[in-house]
Image: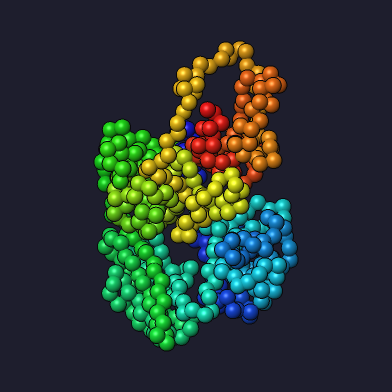
C-alpha cells in the first residue's frame, strides 16, 4: 500500500498549474441573453501544447450540475474553441439558446476542456476537478472575486492581486482582516499588495446599492515553517479516534515522494474550519519519516465531516483526499441511485471538485451475529466459488439484492462468494478494477452496514 501511495504523490507533485477560466462579462447573471465569452488559459498544463480545444460544457439548473452536456470528446462544432494568443475562447451568443434543452434559470456554467476526438489531453483544475462559473440571480445585488484573483497558500513576499465585480453599480469596499484597504464606486474594484509576514489573511469585498448589501470573501495564507514533532504513540495512517473524548480525533497522512522529498507544508481543510486554509490547521511533521499529523478538537460527535488535505510543495498547492478514508464524496455522486445509498451527504460546495474524505465520530456499531463471531473457515481445498459483479447480479444492482438471492446461490452447490472489486472507483459504473480509494466502499452498491449485513 505504501508503494502505491508513494506513486500517487509522485504524480501529484508533478501536476501542472496556472490554468484559469474567466468570462466576458466578468460576472454573469441569470437574465443574460447576450454574448458570453468563456476564456481558458491552459497555463503550463498539457493543454498548453494542444492544437485543438473543445469545451466539455454544461449548466447547473434546479440544483443539478452538468445538465445539457455533450458526450465526452464529442467534437461538436458548437463546443470548438478559437485560439487567441495563449488563450482559448468560446463564444456563446445566448446561453438559453446554447443550452436549449435545459430549463432556466441557470445557476452555473460547468466546464472542462479537451483536445477533441482521438486526443488525450485534458484541461481541469490543478487538482483534477471541474471549473464552475457561478451565475447570479439578476434580482439580487451580488459581488464576487474574479477567478484570476489570488487565493489559497502563497509564499512569503508574494504579491496579492484581487479584482472583484458587482452585478450593478455600487459603493465597493475592500477589507483585509477587518480593516479597509480600498474603496471604489462602480461595478469593479481592484487591489494589490505584497505580503511579507506568515499568517492568515481574509479579504472581504462589500457592495452596497439602494439599501442592499452583498459580500464575498477570499482567504489567503502564508504558512509558517512546518513544526517537527513525533507522532503520538499508536497513531495510525488515516483517522485515529480518541477512546476517551468523542470531540477529538487525530489525522495522519504519509506525504513523501519516490525521491524521498517531503512537501513544505500540509494543512487540512473541511467542514470543521469552513474550508479555510489556516496556519491553525497545519499538520505537524514527524521528522523525515514522511508522516504528518494533527489533532482536531471541538468536534460534534454526531456530525458527518468532509475534509481534504492541502499539500504545498514549492509554489504549488494541491488538494487531495485521505487515501485511508472509509468513505469519500465526489461531484458524480449526484448520479448515484438514491435507493442504494439514502440520505447521502451532499458534496461540499466549498470543495474543489475532486474527492473529499468523510468521518463521523459517533459511527453506528454493527451487531454481528453469534454465527459470524464464531465463524470457522471451510477447507480451502473444498470451495465452490461464485464470482459476482454487484451491479449486474440483480436489477437493483446493490449489496442488499445479493442477500435476497443467497438461497439461489446455495442451491447451485456454491459455498463461497467472491465479489468483484467494490471499493470506490472512478465514475458510477465499473467492474471495479480502477479503484481510487482502497478502504472506501463504492456508494453505488450501498452503505457500509449493507456490506456487513451481507457478510453476516
Residue that appears at 36% across and 63% down = 220
Residue that appears at 35% across and 82% down = 183
- The relative height of residue 43 versus residue 25 in the rendered view (above or below) is above
**Left-right relation of 276 to 410:** left
Q: How is the image coloured?
A: rainbow
Rendering coords of residue 332 (x, y %): 58, 52
Rendering coords of residue 450 (x, y %): 54, 37
Q: What is the number of callouts on the image? A: 0
- Please state which of residues 17 and 356 is positioned toward the viewer in this rendering: 356
**Left-right relation of 233 to 351:** left
Residue that appears at 66% across and 74% down = 96
Visible residue check, residue 57: no
- Please state which of residues 406 and 227 is positioned toward the viewer in this rendering: 406
- Please state which of residues 446 and 57 is positioned toward the viewer in this rendering: 446
Rendering coords of residue 414 (x, y %): 66, 20
Rendering coords of residue 274 (x, y %): 38, 59
Residue that appears at 58% across and 58% down = 123
**Figure quadrant of residue 65:** bottom right
Visible residue check, residue 344: yes
- The relative height of residue 299 versus residue 350 in the rendered view (above or below) is above
Amino acid at each position: 500500500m505504501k508503494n502505491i501511495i508513494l506513486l500517487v504523490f509522485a504524480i501529484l507533485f508533478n501536476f501542472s498549474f496556472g490554468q484559469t477560466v474567466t468570462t466576458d462579462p466578468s460576472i454573469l447573471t441569470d437574465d443574460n441573453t447576450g454574448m458570453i465569452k468563456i476564456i481558458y488559459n491552459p497555463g503550463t498544463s498539457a493543454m498548453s501544447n494542444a492544437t485543438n480545444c473543445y469545451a466539455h460544457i454544461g449548466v447547473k439548473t434546479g440544483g443539478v450540475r452538468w445538465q445539457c452536456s455533450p458526450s465526452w470528446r464529442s467534437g461538436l462544432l458548437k463546443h470548438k474553441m478559437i485560439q487567441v494568443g495563449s488563450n482559448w475562447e468560446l463564444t456563446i451568443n445566448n446561453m438559453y439558446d446554447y443550452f436549449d434543452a435545459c430549463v432556466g434559470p441557470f445557476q452555473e456554467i460547468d466546464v472542462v476542456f479537451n483536445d477533441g476526438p482521438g486526443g488525450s489531453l485534458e484541461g481541469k483544475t490543478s487538482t483534477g476537478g471541474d471549473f464552475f462559473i457561478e451565475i447570479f440571480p439578476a434580482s439580487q445585488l451580488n459581488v464576487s472575486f474574479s477567478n484570476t484573483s489570488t487565493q489559497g497558500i502563497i509564499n512569503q513576499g508574494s504579491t496579492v492581486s484581487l479584482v472583484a465585480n458587482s452585478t450593478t453599480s455600487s459603493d465597493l469596499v475592500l477589507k483585509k482582516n477587518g480593516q479597509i484597504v480600498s474603496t471604489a464606486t462602480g461595478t469593479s474594484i481592484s487591489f494589490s499588495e505584497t505580503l511579507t509576514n506568515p499568517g492568515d489573511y481574509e479579504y472581504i469585498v462589500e457592495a452596497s446599492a439602494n439599501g442592499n448589501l452583498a459580500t464575498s470573501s477570499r482567504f489567503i495564507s502564508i504558512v509558517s515553517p512546518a513544526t517537527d514533532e513525533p507522532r503520538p504513540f499508536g497513531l495510525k495512517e488515516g483517522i485515529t479516534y480518541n477512546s476517551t473524548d468523542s470531540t477529538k480525533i487525530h489525522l495522519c497522512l504519509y506525504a513523501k515522494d519516490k525521491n524521498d522529498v517531503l512537501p513544505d507544508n500540509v494543512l487540512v481543510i473541511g467542514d470543521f474550519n469552513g474550508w479555510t486554509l489556516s496556519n491553525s490547521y497545519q499538520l505537524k511533521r514527524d521528522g523525515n519519516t514522511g508522516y504528518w499529523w494533527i489533532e482536531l478538537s471541538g468536534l460534534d460527535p454526531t456530525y458527518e465531516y468532509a475534509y481534504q488535505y492541502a499539500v504545498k510543495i514549492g509554489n504549488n498547492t494541491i488538494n487531495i483526499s485521505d487515501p485511508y478514508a472509509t468513505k469519500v464524496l465526489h461531484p458524480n455522486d449526484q448520479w448515484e441511485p438514491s435507493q442504494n445509498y439514502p440520505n447521502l451527504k451532499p458534496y461540499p460546495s466549498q470543495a474543489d471538485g475532486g474527492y473529499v474524505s468523510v468521518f463521523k465520530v459517533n459511527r453506528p456499531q454493527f451487531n454481528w451475529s453469534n454465527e459470524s463471531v464464531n465463524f470457522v473457515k471451510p477447507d480451502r481445498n473444498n470451495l465452490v466459488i461464485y464470482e459476482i459483479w454487484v451491479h449486474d447480479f440483480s436489477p437493483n444492482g446493490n449489496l442488499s439484492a445479493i442477500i435476497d438471492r443467497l438461497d439461489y446461490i446455495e442451491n447451485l452447490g456454491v459455498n463461497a462468494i467472491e465479489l468483484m472489486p467494490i471499493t470506490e472507483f472512478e465514475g458510477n459504473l465499473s467492474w471495479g478494477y480502477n479503484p481510487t480509494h482502497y478502504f472506501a466502499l463504492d456508494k453505488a452498491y450501498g452503505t457500509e452496514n449493507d456490506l456487513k449485513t451481507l457478510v453476516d
